Amino acid sequence: MYALHLPVGGLDQLGRFTVQNSYDHISSHGADFIAIIAIDNKFSTVDGNFPKLYRDNIGYDFGSWNYGLTQVDLKEYEQVIFLNSSIVGPNNSDEVFWNYFLNTDVDFLAVTESDQIEKHYQSYLWKIQTKFAASREFRDFMNKPLTENSRESAIQEKELRLRELMQSMKISHKAIFPSGSVCYTNQNPSLDGWEKLLNSGFPYIKKAVIDEKPYLKAKFQLNI
């Protein structure tokens, strides 16, 4: 389930590339893909040959993922993957990464764990086994609306609470890259540890890093 925000002006060139490329690569590894697109303008659409759902821009990524959960028959799947449009890639073969991510025997798996603010799993890419995604505790968590429709509320009430939710559900959970493994614990792993992530086999990078370091476009073969 791919969460994407469509602003009034539409997606920029990098945004259009990112969603189509994500579909092409993820589906090539045998996973079904659906983009849940939060729109500011009810008449806006996104081009691309991938499955799409449109919804009002409420609840940020977790609102989109929650909507997606109501539109998919979870009984058809063993696990549910959640990702958003903040990552770009891959910069090389992603077969090893996806083989590990899809087949690691754990109930909940994230890519990175962070100690910023408090210990938590970063939510740009994670998965959970379907039997737990369908549980009352998880659905209640996903269904609960934000106190206000803001990025800060989404971070405080959803992303920062994921790890403690897994603990309260008493299921196995971990990150591929634990806190402190790719950067100092007071830094953001996906932004400050991007180079170590790449060198360790994670084939994606945050769009925010690309925006800050345009020379990386060549590394990721982004002719845009």
Image (cartoon, rainbow, N blue to C red):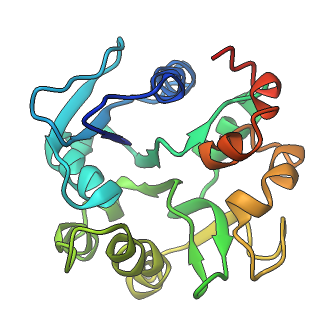
Residue 105 at x, y percent in the picture: 60, 56
In which quadrant will I find the C terminus? top right
State how many labels appear: 0
In the image, 1 versus 134, the foreground residue is 1
Instruction: State which quadrant residue 188 falls in.
Output: bottom right
Taking the spot 36% from the left edge, 14% from the top edge, the residue there is 48
| Residue 37, above or below 152 | above
Residue 20 at x, y percent in the picture: 47, 20
Instruction: State which quadrant residue 12 falls in.
Output: top left
Relative side of 103 to 170, left or right: right
Asked if one can make out residue 106 in the rendered structure from this viewpoint, the answer is: no
In the image, 156 versus 42, the foreground residue is 42
| Residue 110, above or below 84 | below
Relative side of 205 to 118, left or right: right
Residue 157 at x, y percent in the picture: 34, 79
Taking the spot 24% from the left edge, 36% from the top edge, the residue there is 8
In the image, 208 versus 180, the foreground residue is 208
In which quadrant will I find the N terminus? top left
Residue 217 at x, y percent in the picture: 74, 27
**Extreme residue in the left direction:** 42
Asked if one can make out residue 111 in the rendered structure from this viewpoint, the answer is: yes
Taking the spot 75% from the left edge, 34% from the top edge, the residue there is 214
Instruction: State which quadrant residue 91 falls in.
Output: top right
